[in-house]
Amino acid sequence: MIDEKKCYLFGRNPQLNDFCIDHASCSRIHCSLVYHKHLNMAFLVDLGSTHGTYIGKIRLESQKPTQLPVNSTFHFGASTRMYTLRERPQTAPKPVMEELERMTEDSDGGLLGLPETETELDVGSSLFFIK
């Protein structure tokens, strides 16, 4: 998630960037994505690239932080690969395993009515394997 670091770098050089862009129109270090914790906003900064950084179809001014709204798409140079900033998904209020445990407490037998011990498993003669 983008709030884990102060900034993320995009560019062609895999040793220097967090996200490597394999396209001839992208600079070695092309752009940075900065998350401002106090403003709770993301910003893109074009780092003087030759072919530009775009939010939608708008080319960013070099070296000027530009707000990157949630759900907006951005791309670099002439590359057709689009990137989208999304909000962190909301977590479910009740984890699935807790719900399954509650269901099994209300029923007779093991999880979803399956046998709980090895002796209960040895009743039949059929074996089933799951790939």
Image: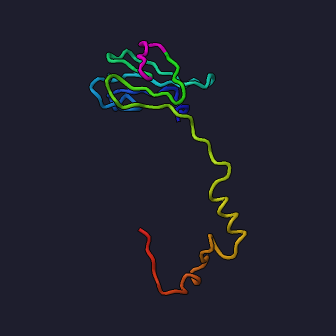
The answer to whether residue 39 is magenta is no
Q: Main secondary structure of the magenta part?
A: loop
User: Which residue ends up furthest to the front in the rendered image?
Assistant: 57
Query: Which residue is at a point 43% across and 16% down the rendered structure image?
Result: 60
Query: Which residue is at a point 45% across and 77% down the rendered structure image?
Result: 128
Residue 22, position as x, y percentages in the image = 30, 31
The answer to whether 120 appears left or right of 54 in the picture is: right
Residue 51, position as x, y percentages in the image = 32, 18
User: Which residue ends up furthest to the left in the rendered image?
Assistant: 24
The answer to whether 13 appears left or right of 68 in the picture is: left
The answer to whether residue 57 is magenta is yes
Query: Which residue is at a point 52% across and 34% down the rendered structure image?
Result: 86
Residue 44, position as x, y percentages in the image = 47, 21
Q: Where is residue 99, by image quadrant?
A: bottom right
Tell me if residue 91 comes above or below residue 7 in the rendering.
Answer: below
**Magenta segment range?**
56-64
Residue 110, position as x, y percentages in the image = 64, 73
User: Which residue ends up furthest to the right in the rendered image?
Assistant: 106
Tell me if residue 113 comes above or below residue 61 in the rendering.
Answer: below
Q: Where is residue 61, by image quadrant?
A: top left
- Residue in front for this viewpoint, 81 or 129: 81
